[in-house]
Image: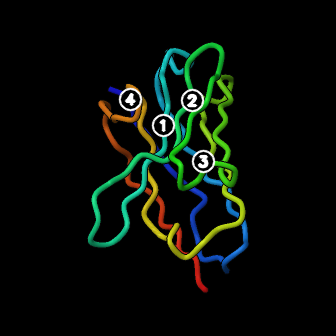
Amino acid sequence: QVQLVESGGGLVQAGGSLRLSCAASGRSFSSYVMGWFRQAPGKEREFVAAITRSIGSTYYADSVKGRFTISRDNAKNTVYLQMNSLKPEDTAVYYCNAEVVRTSPLGSWGQGTQVTVSS
């Protein structure tokens, strides 16, 4: 089973930027379809972004399109989420997942990383 460790969260003012990282264990990282999800207090976990295996095609939730960028470094077994122009509504715990089908997470979760955007 893939082990995931998210990092890079923190407190930032609206309009600021953060870069999240998710380090994955396992020798087959390049075969994983990786994704980021988030869960705000009192809300369900929702899809944010995903990146495919080989070509590295990306897709995003409408709420983050144009502001967030997902990328991966297969040599480092790591997926990133660059978040720009942050808004208070982006405040949530962010999780990555190593088995994403369309916008649905099928794999296990890491511990998550808290992102707080102040207005």
Q: Secondary structure at mark 1?
A: strand
> Residue 97's image quarter?
top left
- Sequence-wise, the earlier of marks 4 and 1 is 4
Q: Residue at x 38, y 46 (%)?
A: 110
Closer mark to the observer between disc 2 and disc 3? 2
| Amino acid at pointer 2 | Ile
User: Which residue does the image show at 73% across and 71% down from the upper left?
Assistant: 16
- The residue that mark 2 highlights is 51
**Left of 32 or right of it: where is 56?**
right
First in sequence, mark 2 or 4: give its number. Answer: 4
Q: Amino acid at mark 1?
A: Gly
**Element carrying mark 2:** strand
Residue 35: assigned label? 1
Quarter-of-image position of residue 78: top right
Q: Is residue 117 above or below residue 24?
A: below
Whether tag 2 and tag 1 are in contact, CB under 8 A, the answer is: yes
State the residue at coordinates (48%, 37%): 35
Furthest residue in direction bottom, as rendered = 119
Q: Earlier in the sequence, mark 4 or mark 3?
A: 4
* Mark 4 nearby-residue class (10 Å; few <14, some 14–19, many ≥20): some
Query: What is the C-alpha distance between the residues marked 2 and 4?
Result: 17 Å
Q: Left of 26 or right of it: where is 17?
A: right
88 lies above or below 114 = below
Q: Position of residue 72 (x, y in %)?
A: 65, 32
Q: Which residue is mark 4?
A: 2
Going by the numbered disc 3, the residue's amino acid type is: Ser
Q: Residues within 10 Å of mark 1 (few under 14, many from 20)?
A: many
